[in-house]
Image (cartoon, rainbow, N blue to C red):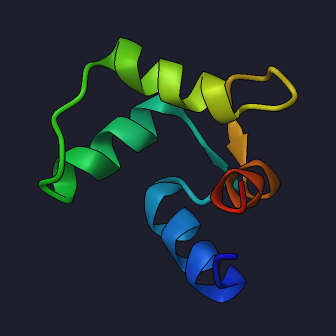
């Protein structure tokens, strides 16, 4: 199981506008800034969709946390 405080910090780093949700664009930007991956918008959308439990095309912290604990 992941540490919820570390997960919250990671979520907040990715949530660029601080609205409590991660969009595909924010996810893509975070990966690029971290130097990890240069993903396309469609790949970022697919990653968010795979974790998006309510289908709103946004990743809430609860959805993020659920994914980390699979």
Q: Position of residue 39 (x, y in %)?
A: 24, 28
Q: In this picture, is 22 found above or below 23?
A: below
Asked whether, in this view, residue 34 is left or right of residue 13, the answer is left
- The quarter of the rendered structure image containing the C terminus is bottom right
Residue at 68 percent of width and 53 percent of height: 64
Q: Nearer the viewer, residue 53 or 59?
A: 53
Residue lying at the far top in this picture: please name it.
42
- Disc count in the image? 0
Residue at 77 percent of width and 48 percent of height: 63
Residue at 68 percent of width and 50 percent of height: 67
Asked whether, in this view, residue 9 is left or right of residue 20, the answer is left
Q: Position of residue 40 (x, y in %)?
A: 26, 19
Q: Which quadrant holds residue 2?
A: bottom right
Q: Position of residue 61 (x, y in %)?
A: 74, 58
Asked whether, in this view, residue 2 is left or right of residue 60, the answer is left
Q: In this picture, is 10 found above or below 67?
A: below
Asked whether, in this view, residue 69 is left or right of residue 30, the answer is right
Q: Nearer the viewer, residue 32 or 17?
A: 32
Q: Position of residue 14 (x, y in %)?
A: 46, 57
- The quarter of the rendered structure image containing the N terminus is bottom right
Q: In this picture, is 29 found above or below 68?
A: above
Residue at 20 percent of width and 59 percent of height: 34
Residue lying at the far right in this picture: please name it.
54
Q: Which quadrant holds residue 38?
A: top left
């Amino acid at each position: 199981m992941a540490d919820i405080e570390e997960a919250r910090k990671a979520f907040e780093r990715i949530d660029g506008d601080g609205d409590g949700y991660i969009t595909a664009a924010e996810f893509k930007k975070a990966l690029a800034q971290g130097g990890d991956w240069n993903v396309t918008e469609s790949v970022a959308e697919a990653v968010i969709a795979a974790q998006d439990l309510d289908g709103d095309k946004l990743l809430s912290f609860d959805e993020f946390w659920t994914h980390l604990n699979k």
